[in-house]
Image: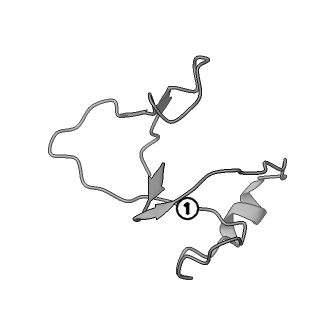
Amino acid sequence: WLLNGHGHSGWKMYPLPMDAEMAAKLDFTKPYEPGVPAFYRILFTAEETGDTFLDLQGWGKRRRPDQRLFARPL
């Protein structure tokens, strides 16, 4: 699949402690770098208010609830 026009496959997943202190240290300003673990975020403006979900069908996961994720407002 593509993220910012870059193909991704063969991932490795690692559990990380994500408390408020760790989350506050994340830096989303660095550019994409192939082969380097990273966190990604997306910012968008909704035309109408309401519940928002990310539909991940076709991204490879076949089990629910991973196919549809609730997007929490900031």
Q: How many marks?
A: 1
Q: Which residue is mark 1?
A: 40
Viewed as shown, does residue 2 lie left or right of 23? left
Q: Position of residue 66 (x, y in %)?
A: 58, 27
The residue lying toward the viewer, choosing from 56 and 46, is: 56
Colouring scheme applied when the structure was drawn: one colour
Looking at the picture, does residue 9 appear above or below residue 41? above
Q: Looking at the image, which residue sits at the far top?
A: 64
The amino acid type, in three-letter code, at marker 1 is Tyr
Q: Looking at the image, which residue sits at the far bottom?
A: 30
The part of the image, by quadrant, that contains residue 58 is top left
Q: Position of residue 48 (x, y in %)?
A: 16, 39
The part of the image, by quadrant, that contains residue 23 is bottom right
Viewed as shown, does residue 52 lie left or right of 9? left
Q: Position of residue 47 (x, y in %)?
A: 15, 45
Q: Identify which residue is drawn at 84% across, 47% down.
A: 15
Q: Identify which residue is drawn at 55% across, 61% down.
A: 40
Q: Position of residue 41 (x, y in %)?
A: 50, 59
Element carrying mark 1: loop
Q: Residues within 10 Å of mark 1 (few under 14, many from 20)?
A: few
Q: Looking at the image, which residue sits at the far left?
A: 47
Viewed as shown, does residue 59 lie left or right of 17? left
Viewed as shown, does residue 20 lie left or right of 60? right
Looking at the picture, does residue 55 appear above or below residue 37? above
The residue lying toward the viewer, choosing from 1 and 29, is: 1
Q: Identify which residue is drawn at 78% across, 53% down.
A: 19
Q: Identify which residue is drawn at 50% across, 36% down.
A: 59
